[in-house]
Image (cartoon, rainbow, N blue to C red):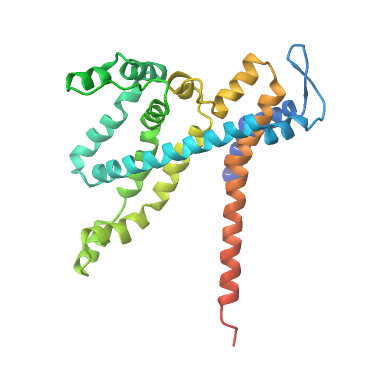
Amino acid sequence: MTISRALSLSFSWAWLLLFSMLPLCIILVIALARSADMVPPFSFAVDPGNLALAATDELYREAFWLSLRTASISTVICLLIGYPMALAIARAAERWRGTLLLALMLPFWTGFLMRINAWIGMLRDDGWINAALTFFGFAPVRLLYTDTALYIGMVYTYLPFMVLPVYARLAKLDATVLEAAADLGASPFRAFLHVTLPLSLPGIAAGVALVFIPSVGEYVIPELLGGPGAQLIGRVMWEEFFENRDWPMAASLAWLLLMLLVVVPVCIRAAVRAGRGHSRGNGSPPAS
């Protein structure tokens, strides 16, 4: 290993240690502490009771389940909408791709809260959507502070995070592969199903991760659009931290969320790889 490579790697590891591992260690220390009426509102100890309570209490389990369900549905909707958008942009003429990508990202040049407040104006009872429904002879519906408004906000916010990695993958596909599939008699649908879709799976995986992970811990959208029933884990952690001033419990919830989002998928992936290796080992012919 050269000196320049060693220096670059040491800088990267130092950066990760300082801005990733160190904050996680601080959160773990707070999670093992005990809540106290002082500043800051905890006393140092080694008490796993908060972690156990966060994992077993029905309120917290319901918040975790609601967060996972909301994030999963939002991710699926983003994939169903974002994949055709990414495919259309990738197959557009070269001179139009930049314009289409700009149109996708242009709303995000404004502030996040401003865009969510704009949705509040459109979704409220006397908003633009109900005004349009009334104009065309339909009865107005309640949208704001419902699950519908929550999913609209989630999909609107995270849709570009699905489109961009899928587009980046689709834009690199070799068109001659599709031409070869057509020459072999494959219909456009079969060519998409057996060529385009498998080759775009890395982009889909990246988009799913970019949408699902931040959606699980989302706080602003459920708070502004979801109403009081949308008690996702992000809102619960905010209440524990700022309203109840129970920092150890909030830190414990954060650590459990980290376990769900990082440790469990890593273990599942390792188990799948181990199972594949075991099956290949059992199926391999004996050496002559």
- Quarter of the picture containing the C terminus is bottom right
Q: Residue furthest right?
A: 45
Expressed as whole percent of the image width and height from the top left, the position of residue 167 reads 32, 44
Q: Is residue 160 left or right of residue 252?
A: left
Q: Residue furthest bottom?
A: 288
Seen from the viewer's position, the closer of residues 221 and 112 is: 221
Expressed as whole percent of the image width and height from the top left, the position of residue 1 reads 61, 51
Location of residue 62 (image quadrant)? top right
Q: Is residue 20 left or right of residue 50?
A: left
Expressed as whole percent of the image width and height from the top left, the position of residue 134 reads 21, 19
Seen from the viewer's position, the closer of residues 17 and 184 is: 184
Location of residue 100 (image quadrant)? top left
Seen from the viewer's position, the closer of residues 145 and 171 is: 145
Q: Is residue 88 left or right of residue 146?
A: left
Q: Is residue 150 left or right of residue 187?
A: right
Q: Is residue 246 above or below residue 52?
A: above
Expressed as whole percent of the image width and height from the top left, the position of residue 88 reads 24, 44
What residue is rendered at 50% in x and 38% in y? 69
Q: Residue furthest top?
A: 38
Q: How many marks?
A: 0
Location of residue 245 (image quadrant)? top right
- Is residue 2 in view from this perspective? no
What residue is rendered at 31% in x and 49% in y? 170
Q: Is residue 160 above or below residue 182?
A: above
- Is residue 140 in view from this perspective? yes
What residue is rendered at 36% in x and 56% in y? 199
Q: Is residue 259 above or below residue 123?
A: below
